[in-house]
Image (spheres, helix red, strand yellow):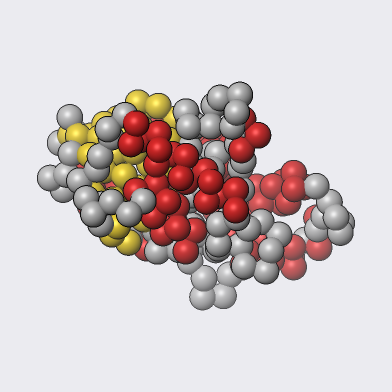
Amino acid sequence: MAQMILVRHAQASFGAHDYDNLSDLGHQQAALLGDYFAQRKQSFDLVVAGNMLRHKQTAGGIVGQSNKHIITTDAGWNEFDFETIVAAYLQASPEQAPVSGAPRSQWYRVLKKAMLAWSNESLVLLGGETWVQFCARVQESAQSIHQSDHQNVLVVSSGGAMAVFLMALLNTSVEQAIAFNLQIKNTSVNHFYFNRAGFQLNSFNNVPHLDTFAHLAKITYS
């Protein structure tokens, strides 16, 4: 069977003016995952990244300067516009806004509520992507891999896109998809096999390159 390794991007710049850029720690995470694959002689005949900067930076950090790996971009694996969705939710429900200096967990709480409102179409987004459109374009990108002749595929994406892919594969609820999204670690390895029958989940949300005493502090979620 062919395999797809689906990786969430490394730590981005949460709280900075430009979130879509890896932090210094994020670059370390990507390089460590690349070292992990290299040590195990894991190569890929297709490397796909969403076309967001953090996706391309992560993919580049994983495969390094190897001429064997040409990175293909596919916007179908991009994250949804969470900043716009959270802003629309807080405009409708300003009492839900975290206070200045609130811990990151409070923003995750708001994101969860905003995603639920977006998914059930109770959130007004003028001209923005709908939940249905988001799910559809992720599945379209997954199907392009399923229908290909590649045997070892690396995909770098974001938590939300990965969560809705899992939602469709496992036939879970939207609430479960949102729970998936909020627990997916940066540079986590999610392993799938696939054949003509479809994808099969083999492992979820593993960070073997960070799961050592020396690197435990490098495990992040944003």
Q: Is residue 3 left or right of residue 63?
A: left
State the residue at coordinates (33%, 61%). 74
Frontmost residue, 115 versus 68: 68
- Of residues 23 and 108, the one nearer the viewer is 23
Residue at 24% x, 43% y is: 44
- Answer yes or no: is residue 120 visible: no
Above or below: residue 190 compared with residue 79: above
Note whether residue 27 is visible: yes
Instruction: Give the side of residue 199 with respect to residue 197, left or right.
Output: right
Residue at left offset 45%, top offset 63%: 52
Say which residue appears at 55% left-offset and 57% top-offset: 22
Indicate left or right for 11 with 132 as reference. Answer: right
Where is residue 81 drawn, in percent x and y?
55, 63
Residue 60 lies, in percent from the top left, at 39, 55
The image shows residue 53 at horizontal and vertical percentages of 47, 64
Residue 32 versus residue 65 in the image, above or below: above
* Residue 196: x %, y % from top left: 15, 36
> In which quadrant will I find the N terminus?
top left
Task: Say if 82 sits above or below 165 in the image.
Answer: below
Picture quarter containing residue 216?
top right
